[in-house]
Amino acid sequence: MDFYNKAASALDQLDQRRGSLKGIVFRLARSSTHFDHKGQRTSPVDSARRISDGKRLLRVVAETLRYRQAIRVILKNTNLLMREKKAFGYRPGQPTTVSRGSNAHPNPESLATILVHDLLFARRGISLAKVHKLRHAVEAHSQLLHAELSRHKMRLGVSENSALAAVATQGEPNDEDEPTESVRWMRVNTIKWAVEEAVDWLIGSGWNETDMDALHQAREGHQLFARDRHLPSVLALSRSVVLSALAPYQDGRLIAQDKASCMPAQLLLGDLSLMQLKKGICVIDATAAPGNKTTMLSALVGRKGKVWAFEKDAERFKTLKQMVAKAGCTNVECILGDFLSVKTNDPRFENVTHILLDPSCSGSGISNRLDHLVDSYRDEARIDSLARFQTTIVSHALRFKSVLQVAYSTCSIWREEDEDVVMRVLEKPEMSKKGWRLKDLSDVLGHGQAWERVGKPRTAGEKPHTDRMVRFDPKLDNTIGFFAAVFVRDLTPPRAHKGQPECSDGSAMIPTSKRPARAKHGRRGDVKRWRGIRPGRLLYL
C-alpha cells in the first residue's frame, strides 16, 4: 500500500507544482520503507531497491497521467468515491489536501485515480492483497467501471484504450518544439579546475567542440559540446550524455546545473573587482538546498570569501552538505535553520554584503519530457500565497544593515511571482528611504554579451524598470523558465526632484507617494542615518 500512497502523493504534489515529475517521484521513492526477509525495517537511504522503486513509481505515475482525463470522467460518472467513501476516507466538499512528508495521507481522489488506472489499464491489475479493503472497494465496481470506460470510448469515437492516451497527450512536445531537451548544461567547478582544463579533458576524451547552433542540430549519439556565450564557466553538452560516464561529474569538477540557474550568482557577483575579492566578500545563500547555486557562489567569492548557506528542511540540508563537500567548498558554512528567523542585526552576519534568494515558487517554469502530462493550470490562491511569502523574504533580506546587493530569482513564469514581487518591494517607502533600486545588469555577464529577454511590463505600453530584470524562455534559450533581478543599495540616496526619475548614475529608482521626511539637521542627519559604514571603506565592500 505504501507504493500506491506514494503514487497518489506524487499526483498531489504535481498538481501543486512542487517540482518536476521526475524530481517528485524519486524524492518519494527515497523515503520508501523496505523490510528484509526477517521482517525488519531497513534504511531507505541504504536500500539498493530505491532506484528500481523510483523507476517503477515513475512508470505508474506517468501512465496514470496519460489516462487521467478519462479516469476523471469515469470516476465522476460512476460516483465511485461516494459509493466507497468510507474505504477512501472521502468527505464530499472537503478541500484538496497536499501530501507533505513520506507518511502523509494522499488526497482520496488521487488514490482512487491510481487504483482505477491499474484496474482498467494495467495488465497486472491492482497490486494489492485480495483482502485489502481498497482493492475490494474498487474491484466491487469493476463491471460498472469497465462499462463506463466503454461508453467513454464510444463518446470519443475510439475503440482502443491507447487512443485515450493519444487524446490526452495531443500537442505533446517533440524534440523540435521543445529545445530544452537539446542540450545538457554543465557548470565547470572552478574551485577544482579551470575552464580550459575542462575543455582539454573533454577533447581528450573524444568530445568535439562546436557552437550552440550546431549542437542543437546534432544527431543523437554525437559527443559535442559548446561554450556558453554569456556565462564563462558554463558548457553545453549533447543531451544524450550519460552523466555517470563522466569522471569529472562524479568527482565534482563538473556540476549539472541549468544555465538559467547559474544566472543569479553571476548577476550578483559577476562584477566584483580583484580588490574586493582580495579583501573578502561575505554572502548569504538564504534558501540553499540542493546546493548548486551555493557552490557557484563559493567559486565566485574565492578562498578569502565566505558563504553562509541556510536550509530549514533537515533532509534537504543533508543534500546541501553533501553537495558542498563534493564540490570542495571550504569557504561555505551550512546552517540548518530558517533564514526568516535570523535577526537582521545578528553580529554573525555584520560583514555580509550580498544575499542570494531563490525561495519557494510555483515551479511553473520547470519542464522536461514528462511534465507536459500535468495539467497546465494556474492555482491562483497558491500563486498569491507564494507571492506574499516571496515579498516577505525579499523585504527581510533588504533590511540587513551591511547588505549592498540582493539577487532574487524564481523558476516561475508567472509575473505575480516575478516582476510584481520586485515592484511591490521597491514601492515600499521603507525601501526607498534605504536607497534600494534595481541593478544595471549590462556589465555583469561574461564575454561582453548582453541578455536579450527582460522583464514583462504590466501593460503593453509600460516599461518601468523591466530592462533591469532577466527572463529565460525555454523555447528560445534551451533552459527552464526563469526570472532574476538584483537589488542594489545607494548608501547616500539623492533627494527626489521633479522631472528627475533616475539616480545620477542612471539607475532606476521607484518613486513613492510621499516624499521622505527631511532630516532634522540637514546632511548631518543623513550621515547619522547611515553610520556604521565608513565612506572610505565602500571600495572594499
Image (cartoon, rainbow, N blue to C red):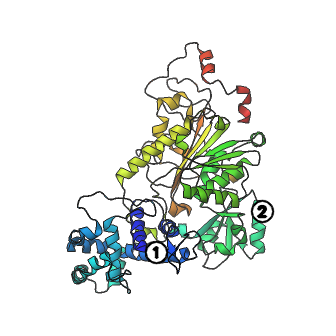
**Quick one: which residue is furthest to the front in this view?**
38
Helix, strand, or loop for circle 2?
A: helix
Residue at image position (34%, 76%) is 115
- Determine the image quadrant of residue 507: top right
Residue identified by numbered label 1: 57
Q: CA distance from mark 1 to mark 2?
A: 41 Å
Provide residue 403's location: percent of width, then percent of height.
Answer: 62, 36
Question: According to the image, label 2 marks what residue?
Answer: 196
Q: Quadrant where the N terminus lies?
A: bottom left
Is residue 524 shown above or below 60? above
Other-residue count near label 2 (Cα within 10 Å), few / some / many at <14 / 14–19 / ≥20: few
Of marks 1 and 2, the one in the foreground: 1
Instruction: Say above or below: 277 vs 217.
Output: above
Which one is in front, 97 or 393? 97
Mark sitting earlier along the chain (1/2)? 1
Q: Quadrant of the C terminus?
A: top right
Query: Which image quadrant is residue 279 in?
Result: top right
Q: Is residue 473 above or below residue 428?
A: below
Give the percent coordinates (x, y) of residue 369: 49, 71
Q: Is residue 101 visible?
A: yes
Q: Is residue 188 visible?
A: no
